Amino acid sequence: MMRIYFIGIFILLTAIVANFIAYKLNIMTWYGFIEFLTASGEKEIVIRIIDYVWLFLAYPIILGFGYWIGNKMYQFLFS
């Protein structure tokens, strides 16, 4: 159970950093995407190709990297 918690912390930290970088680069995050899906017709949100690439390719790969780093760190520290 401790291993799962430790890896989860690394995934969370990775997600925070990834969202910060996406925000600074003006790339849509999942929060903006959900807002887009639930928006009524009042405002227009443009989703660019880079947003789709980020949300459905790069972001999951980055979170997977967070898992990998967390697992390696756990093995290094506790095994």
Image: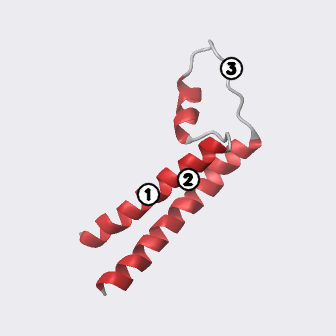
Q: Is residue 40 left or right of residue 68?
A: right
**Distance from Cα at disc 2 to Cα at disc 1:** 9 Å
Q: Position of residue 18 (x, y in %)?
A: 55, 53
Secondary element under disc 2, as helix, strand or loop, is helix
Badge number at residue 58 = none
Badge number at residue 13 = 1
Say which label, 2 or 1, has the lower sequence index. Answer: 1
CB within 8 Å, label 2 to label 1 = no
Q: Is residue 12 left or right of residue 43?
A: left
- The image shows a total of numbered marks equal to 3
Please identify, in this view, whether the residue under mark 1 or under mark 3 is nearer the observer.
1
Work out which residue is located at the far right of the displayed protein and give it: 49
Camera-nearest residue between 32 and 24: 24
Q: Position of residue 23 (x, y in %)?
A: 60, 42
Work out which residue is located at the far front of the displayed protein and give it: 24
Q: Quadrant of residue 46?
A: top right
Residue at position x 49%, y 53% in the image: 15
Secondary element under disc 1, as helix, strand or loop, is helix
Say which label, 3 or 2, has the lower sequence index. Answer: 2
Query: Which residue is denoted by mark 3 in the rendering?
Result: 44
**Distance from Cα at disc 1 to Cα at disc 3:** 32 Å
Amino acid type at mark 2: Ala
Instruction: Name the quadrant of the N terminus.
Output: bottom left
Amino acid type at mark 1: Leu
Query: Which residue is denoted by mark 2 in the rendering?
Result: 18
